[in-house]
Image (cartoon, rainbow, N blue to C red):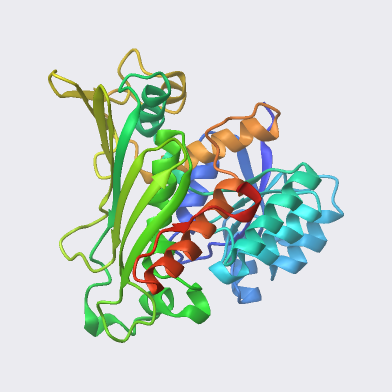
Amino acid sequence: MKKLKWGMIGGGEGSQIGPAHRLGALADGHFELAAGALDHRPEVGREYAQRLGVAADRAYGGWEDMLAGEQGREDRVDLVTVATPNSTHFEITKSFLEAGFNVLCEKPMTMTVEEGEEIVRVAESTGKICAVNYCYSAYPMVRQARAMVRTGEIGKVRLVVTNFSHGHHGDATDADNPRVRWRYDPKMAGVSGQFADCGIHALHMASFVCDDEVKTLSADFASTIASRELEDDAMVNFRMDGGTVGRLWTSSVAIGRQHGFDIQIFGETGGLRWASEQPNQLIYTPVGGRTQIIEKGEGGLSADAERLSRVAIAHPEGFPLAVANIYCDLADAIRGEIRDGLPNAADGVRSMAAVHAAVASSNDNGAWVDARPSIFR
């Protein structure tokens, strides 16, 4: 099958997310890196793109140059990944969608709900794919959990508990580190720090696995390091459309926790637990029965879990291959086979609406507020 052409904006040398995208996009042979504007410093970006194998005439100095250059080519890229700072996501994503390109945007998709709703409308009007990189939902055993919920193996879901908490920003003496400081600066991060950074992964995961959407929420934000304007710890209670009760904790000052992303789903007839630090295992407990470990790669898994597993049982598949699964679903979608597990612009705007709702709730002493964007009310 002919490879699809892929272009990347941001994610340059030394970035945290860039290598994961490049490993993921190229892992299964669906894409080739054909174009890039990889750095805000034009010459640095051009040089690095060429080192990665991009032709000199498609190694661009900025995203505007890439848009202009690719728009006029017969062999234009089939997909553009946006991995730039949060405040630039909306303008770049909207511009490429309007020019007829499919887009994968890093989260958060936008900084405001209004921008997110505009992206949804543009994607619908152009007929182009706008995906959002909620890559944790692409782990095979997360897809297995979702399938088990959908087929009723744990009965109606009563409660979901999820958290994404780490301690890597817990050192107050490191608060001025540029790689840390921007996350708590509203000029760069927007209205929320930790919840918008990590908490929305946990919230999206709850919606994804439960196959339901968050309707209302109540939040308590805290800035435990005094110099931070935005929160570094948050507790969010929520209710879903189907009646499920949700609890979410997210923190960047939980010293001793490393990645700290996990989810538990409690139904009428059983419970499930998945943790990102042991991603190949799904823990299942039927009511009145023994706890079982379901392993990635074993027989009898859901079609999605089997499709997105590459190596034999007991061999680990890590974060870059979860990103690769997003690219697998994108490749199928571009070729005409839509995958319902692919996070899209609707997921992106729901997340941003939840962020703004949580900020409003916390500012109002935890009042319950509507967490839905206006277009989905």
Rendered view: 20 above or below 32: below
The answer to whether residue 136 is seen in the rendering is no
Rendered view: 266 above or below 247: above
Q: Is residue 288 left or right of residue 322?
A: left
- The one of 305 and 165 positioned closer to us in this rendering: 165
User: Residue at horizontal 29%, vertical 51%?
Assistant: 163
Which quadrant, please, contains the N terminus? Answer: top right
User: Residue at horizontal 42%, vertical 21%?
Assistant: 306
Q: Is residue 223 left or right of residue 254?
A: right
- The one of 304 and 370 positioned closer to us in this rendering: 370
- The one of 248 and 196 positioned closer to us in this rendering: 248
Rendered view: 358 above or below 263: below
Q: Quadrant of residue 276?
A: top left
The answer to whether residue 120 is seen in the rendering is yes
Residue 201 image point, x, y percent:
41, 51
- The one of 279 and 74 positioned closer to us in this rendering: 279
Q: Is residue 174 left or right of residue 352?
A: left
Residue 361 image point, x, y percent:
41, 66
Number of marks drawn = 0
Q: Quadrant of residue 26?
A: top right
Residue 5 image point, x, y percent:
69, 43
Residue 302 image point, x, y percent:
41, 19
